[in-house]
Image (spheres, rainbow, N blue to C red):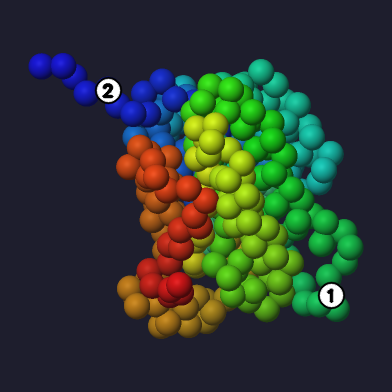
Amino acid sequence: MVAMRNEFEGRTALVTGASRGIGAAAAVALARAGCARMLIHYSASFEAAQETARRVRELGAEAELIGGDLSTEEGIRGFVDSLGGRAREVDILVNNAGSLLRRAKLAEMSYELYNQVMDLNAKSAWFITQAVAPHMAARGAGVIVHVSSIAARTGGGIGATVYAAAKAAVSAFARGMARELAPHGVRVNAVSPGTVDNDFHARFSTREMLDAVVRQTPQGRLSTNEDIADVIVFLCSDAARNVIGQTIEVNGGMFMI
Ligand SMILES: NC(=O)c1ccc[n+]([C@@H]2O[C@H](COP(=O)([O-])OP(=O)(O)OC[C@H]3O[C@@H](n4cnc5c(N)ncnc54)[C@H](OP(=O)(O)O)[C@@H]3O)[C@@H](O)[C@H]2O)c1
């Protein structure tokens, strides 16, 4: 009997923001699915990134750490530079790094914070894709998954409007990049988490806010990092071969479209 080849065998994946949360879960899930090599991006959380690498290696994949603050143009350029020749080796790109950074209502938003939120959540996804996608297109194969947010559709909670706008840009990138790259064999989609029970909301939301979300959620719970990571793996898999330019909402039914 001929052994079935694992579709992820030999694949190199780059996951940004893979030190913690959804990104760490995605790196581990992709390694478990059979990816051979994981490029683990991190910024402030070096030790957590080392832990992701340890878990990835335990699953039999190679792991390399690449640092970089993506909240400034200089930092994005520096990260792209430090990718170097590895940019041409990426088969799967997960643009996950992102953050609200700080809640700020209309009058409280500074020019500096506006730029940081936009650079981290939107500009970084654009320019990292710019560095990687031409090599995928030249090979006629590749998969890109952006991480958007339910905020892209709702406009975000109080003080999260600019973050929501950045995520709306990410969802638009998924459609526009998909249209440009699909003829070259590269699939682009986005996953849009609702409210994930992780550091993100531990930092930016109160327990009362999270309990209110649970009450509004048909499934009766918050999402987990793994709930989102599994959909990322699906979007990277051949099972999603005809899924192009979509933003998949993953939120336990809290928000339906
Ligand atoms: N949690 C939610 O409910 C939720 C909902 C919708 C969308 N999302 C999106 O999902 C993605 C992952 O978030 P998460 O929930 O996993 O949050 P998280 O646990 O706070 O993790 C955020 C990740 O992004 C990285 N990051 C943060 N600031 C960065 C910076 N300045 N430069 C480079 N990397 C930076 C972090 O790296 P370091 O720790 O190494 O700095 C970390 O790996 C984000 O794009 C977020 O907007 C989350």
Residue 192: image location, x then y, percent: 51, 59
Checking the image for residue 108, the label placed there is: 1
Q: Between 247 and 11, which is closer to the camera in this rendering?
A: 247
The quadrant of the picture occupied by the N terminus is top left
Residue at mark 2 to residue at mark 1: CA–CA distance:
54 Å
Amino acid type for the residue under numbered disc 1:
Glu
Q: Between 43 and 110, which is closer to the camera in this rendering?
A: 110
Checking the image for residue 243, the label placed there is: none
Q: Between 4 and 194, which is closer to the camera in this rendering?
A: 4
Q: Is residue 38 visible?
A: no
Image marks 2 and 1: residues in contact by CB distance under 8 Å: no
Residue 223: image location, x then y, percent: 42, 63
Amino acid type for the residue under numbered disc 2:
Arg
Residue visible at 41% across and 36% down in the picture:
30
Mark 2 vs mark 1, foreground winner is 2
Residue visible at 58% across and 50% down in the picture:
174
Q: Which residue is mark 2?
A: 5
Q: Residues within 10 Å of mark 1 (few under 14, many from 20)?
A: few
- When asked about the image quadrant of residue 111, the answer is bottom right
- When asked about the image quadrant of residue 202, the answer is bottom right
